Structure formats: structure tokens, C-alpha cells
Image (cartoon, grey):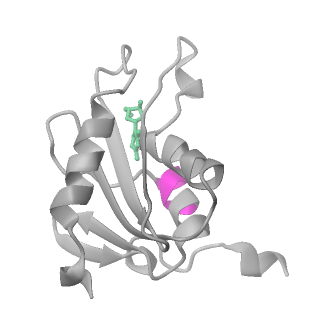
Amino acid sequence: MADEIDWDALTAAANEAATHAYAPYSGFSVGAAALVDDGRVVAGCNVENAAYGVALCAECGLVSQLHLTGGGRLTHFVCVNGEAELIMPCGRCRQLLHENGGPDLLLLTASGVRRMDEILPDAFGPENLR
Ligand code: THU
């Protein structure tokens, strides 16, 4: 299944998103892109703030675009820095991705394609609130 996906196109979308990053404080641009279960591609870039802790990760924008454009489930995800290197989502963003893609979400990483439940094992999720 993983090899039926055009990871290069998704990575290109993440790299394009990174060009829109607003990261004057860290100097670390991030772009993220994901495939949605209806075929849409959603993307996001990081947006920093003079109040450093308010920074929005690229994944925040991506998840917002997911809901803004009709919702659905994330199926495939790529995150890159401004040097076009694959990076791992931060801990908080793993939680965001888990909520919107679930344990089956596939992530392209420097160590290959990995499942969400591999990079956020034993996740707290919506089912825990039932
Ligand atoms: N960043 C992201 O956008 N996503 C991540 O998963 C890791 C970190 C951003 C936040 C901040 O603007 C910059 O990278 C440096 O931490």
C-alpha cells in the first residue's frame, strides 16, 4: 500500500509549504503535507510569534486546513525543514496527527515509512473519553 502512494509529490507539497514559513526567531522553517482519505492534499507551515511560546507548528496549520476544507482522515504525512530534510513531528504534533489520522496514518521519515502507532505508542485518544 505504501508504495502506491506518490511520496515524492507529497514531499514536494511539504517543501513548497516550508517556503511560506514565518520563522524569524528560530530560523527553522517547517513544511508539512498530508494526503486525506478523499484524495485531497492539505499542508501547513510554521508561524512563530514574538511571544516565542505561541509559535504554531506546521502541523497546526495542516490540521486547520483539513477541517476548513471538509474534514476527513489523514492517511499519509510528510514533514520537512527548510533544507528539504525529512523531520519528525514534535510530541504535541504527534498527538494532533493521531487525532486526525489514527493509528494507521503513515509517515515518511528518514528511517522509512512508519505508522502513527509506532511513533506515538499507547496514545491517548478520543476513545479514552468514552
Ligand atoms: N516545528 C514545527 O513546525 N513542527 C514540528 O513538528 C517541530 C517544530 C517548528 C516550531 C518552531 O517554529 C520551529 O519548528 C523550531 O522549533
What's the residue at 51%, 62% (across, down)? 97
Q: Is residue 72 visible?
A: yes
Q: For residue 105, which quarter of the picture?
A: bottom left
Measuring from the top left, give residue 77's x and y in whole percent. Answer: 36, 62
**Total numbered circles:** 0
Measuring from the top left, give residue 14's x and y in whole percent. Answer: 29, 46
What's the residue at 23%, 63% (across, down)? 109
The reply, left or right, for residue 64 in relation to residue 106 is: right
The magenta stretch spans which residues? 91-95
Q: Is residue 80 visible?
A: no
What's the residue at 53%, 17% (across, down)? 49
What's the residue at 49%, 48% (across, down)? 62
Q: Residue furthest right?
A: 130
Q: Residue furthest bottom?
A: 1
Measuring from the top left, give residue 32's x and y in whole percent. Answer: 36, 48
Q: Residue 84: within the magenta? A: no
Q: For residue 35, which quarter of the picture?
A: bottom left
Vertical arrangement, residue 3 with respect to residue 18, above or below: below
Quarter, ligand 1: top left
Q: Main secondary structure of the magenta part?
A: helix
**The C terminus is located in which quarter?**
bottom right
